Image (spheres, rainbow, N blue to C red):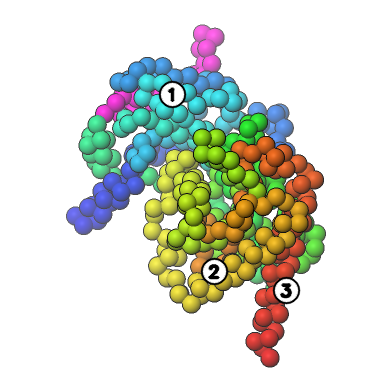
Amino acid sequence: MTARTALILVALALAIGAGSFASSAAQAAEAAAARPESVAAAAPASADRYPVASAARVGGDDKQTRFVVDLSQKIDIAAFTLANPYRVVIDLPQVTFKLSPTAGEQARGLIKAFRYGLIMQGGSRIVIETKGPVRVDKAFTLDAADGMPARLVIDLSATDRASFLRNIALENHPARAPARTSAPAPKDDGDPRPMIVLDPGHGGIDNGTKGLDGTLEKDVVLAFAQSLRERLEASGKYRVTMTRGDDTFIPLNERVRFARAHNAALFISIHADYVPRKEGTAEGATVYTLSEHASDAEAARLAEAENRADVIAGVDLTAEPDDVANILVDLAQRETKTFSLQFARSVVSEMKNTARLHKHPLKSAGFVVLRAPDVPSVLVELGYMSTRGDLKNLTSASWRARTAAAVAHAVDNFFMRRLAGRGARAN
């Protein structure tokens, strides 16, 4: 390795706040080969094929803190640290989490909070958000013994930022998401129908927002995407696929790559918003298109929150250079934005007949998932999980069916206009 290469690697490690990633991470991620079931369809009996995490607890103070998870069996783990924000990431094989609904929300010692969930097929992740820079003193699992369950144990000690970053540079292991086996793009079989990619937001370790009744955004948007997919496929006019069809975490840039790999003619990302009570109230659906300059402060807030999804999962991929961004053709990108805006307007026009709309239903902001240069893309916020009326609609099967039908009509309008436009140019 040349001195220049070494310096680049060290700089990369410092830039993304990467910590050591034990080589056993890939082995741990591959330990469970079975495909995870959908949240709605998974039965407890099938879920228990995987190791079960039944309880979690935190003890200690602001100098030393221990994090413990009770398990049904001993498993392999890999732990590493990240900065900006400070956190400890624990990768493990696929685990069924049966923890308290409020687990991870209480701060203690060096730990502010923790999240957990599926990160990929066959792999789970726990992300511990810390109050400052920490050092992982020990990370191990124990077999069940003397009437005690198997346990995962992480011992943390407080350190200073300089030491934290120095350790990262010395380790020289830039953090990355676990190896993911992407679904292969469909073969070109000559089917002329447009390919539509539906993108249910969040998933796995990333729950998204939480409704007043505890309903999770990731479940709401997956149910809506499935309803919309059924509606579009029933028409016979389109080929339809989804970035996720179960409770799996998908990094933001991976969603964009998925759409391009499938030669998508249209990309629809589906989400639901939330406004903290102290910031007031809001209601209704909003449709977003891409813009580097947000249309208003609320749009900027939402884009920033959605773009931090990869941070929630443990590794922030949004800061990585995007190869696509380096080869954008200005003209093609301009045309794509025009098509995106046309479709967004059609969605708003159709949804006003079936759903409550935000007072400003058409907005723009810098969402990562809308950055494919050659795929017309919109992000639909179906409503607010923090508003009782919206939440009632979001969890209603009948509302979901009506609204999915409205979005499907918007899709029809979009492609009819494009085909008509091509015909006019041909003449």
Q: Nearer the viewer, residue 243 or 283?
A: 283
Q: Is residue 187 left or right of residue 79?
A: right
Q: Indicate which disc, 1 or 2, sits on the residue closer to the N terminus.
A: 1
Q: Residue at x 45, y 60 (%)?
A: 293
Question: Alpha-carbon distance for marks 1 and 2?
Answer: 44 Å
Give the numbered dot on residue 337: 2
Question: Magenta-highlighted stretch: main secondary structure?
Answer: strand
Q: Is residue 239 left or right of residue 59?
A: right
Q: Is residue 321 magenta?
A: no
Q: Position of residue 94 (x, y in %)?
A: 56, 35
Q: Which residues are magenta?
A: 135-159
- Secondary structure type for disc 2: helix
Amino acid type, residue under disc 2 in the picture: Lys
Mark 3 crowd level (few <14, some 14–19, many ≥20, 10 Å Cα):
few
- Secondary structure type for disc 3: helix
- Secondary structure type for disc 1: loop
Q: Position of residue 83 (x, y in %)?
A: 34, 39
Question: Alpha-carbon distance for marks 3 and 2?
Answer: 18 Å
Amino acid type, residue under disc 3 in the picture: Met
Residues under numbered marks 1 and 2 in contact, where contact means CB atoms less than 8 Å apart: no
- Identify the residue position indicated by label 3 in the image: 416
Is 421 above or below relative to 353? Answer: below
Q: Nearer the viewer, residue 68 or 171?
A: 68
Amino acid type, residue under disc 1 in the picture: Ala
Q: Residue at x 50, y 58 (%)?
A: 295
